[in-house]
Image (cartoon, rainbow, N blue to C red):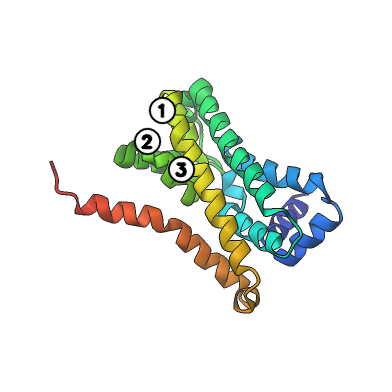
Amino acid sequence: MLHSILDFLRSLTDPERLIQLLSTLLSGWLGYAALFAVVYSETGLLIGLFLPGDSLLFTVGVVAGAGHLNIVLVNVLLMSAAMLGDSTGYLLGRKTGPRIFSRKESRFFKQEYIARTKAYYDRYGGKTIVLARFVPIVRTFAAFVAGVGQMRYLRFLPYSVCGGIGWVFLMTVLGYELGSVPLVRRNFDKAILLIIFVSLLPTIVEVVRARRRPLA
């Protein structure tokens, strides 16, 4: 069972395997629904540690560029999934969040994940929700921690909208534009690593700016 799940997740970051998947088991609207579910689950169900966020969106863009997905529909659906996932994670944090701090550590959950996300909030405040979209692990828990901290939803929502739209658009359009480049297709694994680095740039820039600001 676990092997089948891991194999399915690997297929989401391989253009040829994803195209095959969308042409057989997940054809038509079922394929779009599956992609929606994966993006939603990353923050909505707090299982982003196991899901290929950035690499999935880039691969989806490549597949759309090859004509197997509608790039406009993909963006609308996955942006919606990202924002809905954030709101669900926020509500989970607001309702049940305090219990997470007393939860025992396990193989898949560590208090360090929550502490790392909280550190981002301490440094960047509400902008964490936008920046977190480009940071693995922090992305999974950012909305949840906002709920735990009782951030007002009307303050949370604009950051969530900006982060979800920016993340999905940037990753899919990069895949859409670069996926047909022979060099990229021949070195797809390296291209994925480069895309992950590019996705981290906004956070890197913000960290550099924060360190250059004079202390009050």
Vertical arrangement, residue 64 with respect to residue 28, above or below: below
- Give x and y (percent) for residue 208: 28, 56
Mark 2 or 3: in front is 2
Task: Say if mark 2 contacts mark 1, CB within 8 Å.
Answer: yes
Badge 2 crowding class, 10 Å Cα cut-off, few under 14, some 14 to 19, many 20 or more, is some
Neighbours of disc 3 within 10 Å: few (<14), some (14-19), many (20+): some
Give the amino acid at mark 2. Gly
Q: Secondary structure at mark 2?
A: helix
Outermost residue toward the right in this view? 24
Mark 1, other Cα within 10 Å: few <14 / some 14–19 / many ≥20: few
Q: Could you tell me residue 188's position as x and y percent? A: 62, 71
Element class at badge 3: helix
Residue under the image location 26 percent in, 53 percent down: 209
Quarter of the image that includes the C terminus = top left
What residue is disc 3 on? Answer: 113
Q: Which residue matches tag 2?
A: 126
Q: Which mark is residue 155?
A: 1
Q: How many marks?
A: 3
Whichever of callouts 1 and 3 sits on the residue coming sooner in the sequence is: 3
Place of residue 61 in the rendered image (x, y in percent of width and height, measured from the top left):
64, 59
Query: Disc 2 to disc 1, how far (Cα)?
Result: 8 Å
In terms of depth relative to the viewer, which is nearer, 159 or 135?
159
Residue visible at 77% across and 48% down?
31
Tell which tag, 1 or 3, sits nearer the viewer. 1
What's the amino acid at mark 1? Arg
Element type where label 1 sits in the image: helix
Determine the CA span between mark 1 and mark 3: 23 Å
Q: Say which residue appears at 75% left-offset and 62% top-offset.
A: 67
In the rendered view, would you say 67 is above or below 116? below
Image quadrant in which you'd find residue 37: top right
Q: Which mark is residue 6?
A: none
Q: In the visual, does 114 lie left or right of 89? A: left
